[in-house]
Amino acid sequence: MNSTLQNDSSVSSNRVENAFKQLVRFGWEQALSCLFPVVIFTSLALTQIIPLPLLPRYDWLLIICLVMQWWMVRSGLETRDELKVITLFHVIGLALEIFKVHMGSWSYPEEGYFKVFGVPLYSGFMYASVASYLCQAWRRLKVQLIKWPPFWLVVPLAAAIYLNFFTHHYWIDVRWWLAGLVMIVFWQAWVTYEVNGFRYRMPLALAFVLIGFFIWIAENIATFFGAWEYPNQTDAWSLVHLGKVSSWLLLVIVSFLIVATLKRAKGNEMAIFNSRKKSGNIEQ
């Protein structure tokens, strides 16, 4: 009897130890995937504490982001295809920033030479860093999608979510309707990922919520270091309203849908290429 209890205790202890090791490994892979965002946050903190010469702070942040992006591609941490995705996010994010600043949703009060309609160009890299994280995590964790919805559903949904960030200033805000549509469209969708040779899975909707929540935490850190400023933070910094999680959730969904669509398209191209190569239609 005692021997049986000891064996059960040993098995339980091993399971806990293995689970902890897997959690640590998962955290490490996530940390490596967040390299670009970490550089941005570190730069925000350092440039606020240590004034840099010659150029305003926003311009130094742009230079740091450009150098970091060049190094990511040069070192092989990001591929040229991933750079195209990240550049797309930079443009999408910058367009949203220009509109939101114009509408008074937030502001960039500091001076800068490289500002467009009151928006410093480095701000686009904050959106690009989300795309960088998704691309890195996708590759490191060998992400696969189960029961991914058809293209004709995914693209209009992503477009509607993005457009609502603009149109809700002039029309009704349909974010919750769109969030409901996301739940319906992705109800049966799962994301699987690999950690140290073992595969795990979670509902895709849950993955959206988790990423959106952590970006909200990152937003609080960014505003604390003066990345941008909400109207209620003009006199003193305060916590970003929890309702912003819904905005980041929807933006994450747009990001994920674009990355997933492009990844799947690239995967289909590779599958066709390999099929033709095997059949001898492509020269070796």
Image (cartoon, rainbow, N blue to C red):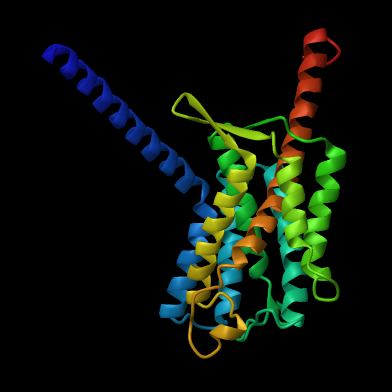
152 or 174: nearer the eye?
174
Residue 25 horizontal/vertical position (percent): 40, 37
Q: Is residue 55 left or right of residue 161?
A: left
Residue 183 found in image quarter: top right
Residue 86 horizontal/vertical position (percent): 69, 52
Residue 223 horizontal/vertical position (percent): 53, 74
Q: Is residue 15 left or right of residue 135?
A: left
Farthest-out residue, front: 1
Q: Is residue 122 above or below residue 29?
A: below
Q: Is residue 143 visible?
A: no
Q: Is residue 141 above or below residue 43?
A: above
Q: Is residue 278 visible?
A: yes
Q: Is residue 270 above or below residue 247?
A: above
Q: Is residue 130 left or right of residue 119?
A: left
Residue 274 horizontal/vertical position (percent): 76, 18
Residue under the point 84% across and 42% down: 153
